[in-house]
Image (tube, rainbow, N blue to C red):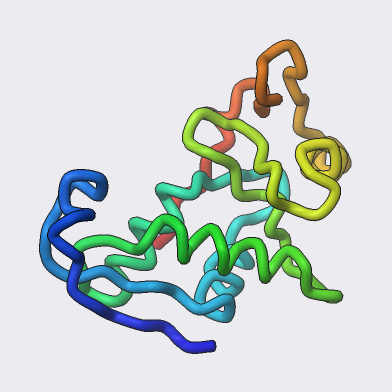
Amino acid sequence: MEDIIESIPKTMEKFLGCAGQMVKPSPDTVEALVGQVKKGKLATISQLREKIARDFNVDTACPAATLKALQLVSKKEQAKCFWRIVKEKGELISKFPNGVEGHAELLQSEGHKIDFSKKVPVVAGYESKLSKFA
């Protein structure tokens, strides 16, 4: 699977908040970036998408394709630290192996505290743990 750059369909411009071009990243591209997030740190899917878009000099990265590539990375036998990626408000990702419970276990093994009182569990204090992509 390879990275694909295409024009943003008119029907998606409002949803994506922009016109122009988008990239549908490959699992290899996503895995390389995920591997940059150090132990004890986190990154959001939006941060990941923004970095991919910058790297490809396009307006955005497709959210569905980015999440799909991240899911494929998470299912690899020697998967890099995919669990360090969370949703925008620190929410756990149910599409990872073993759902949010599996995501929580991996994050907890690195010292993160998980707040299970919400509808979707979140990493407590995730804002202070966010990494920045170079």
Q: Position of residue 73 (x, y in %)?
A: 68, 69
Point out the residue furthest to the bottom here.
2
Q: Position of residue 93 (x, y in %)?
A: 66, 42
Q: Tell me the quarter of the picture where residue 24 sits.
A: bottom left
Quadrant of the image containing the N terminus: bottom right
Q: Tell me the quarter of the picture where residue 81 sits.
A: bottom right
Given residues 45 and 125, the one toward you in this image is 45
Quadrant of the image containing the C terminus: bottom left
Q: Residue at x 85, y 48 (%)?
A: 98
Q: Residue at x 53, y 68 (%)?
A: 33
Q: Residue at x 19, y 63 (%)?
A: 59
Vertical position of residue 108 compared to residue 4: above or below: above
Vertical position of residue 128 compared to residue 98: above or below: above
Q: Position of residue 108 (x, y in %)?
A: 84, 36
Point out the residue furthest to the top here.
117
Vertical position of residue 84 compared to residue 70: above or below: above
Point out the residue furthest to the front here.
11
Given residues 105 and 69, the one toward you in this image is 69
Q: Residue at x 46, y 58 (%)?
A: 64
* Residue 85 in the figure: left or right of residue 104: left
* Residue 111 in the figure: left or right of residue 27: right
Q: Position of residue 58 (x, y in %)?
A: 21, 70
| Number of marks | 0
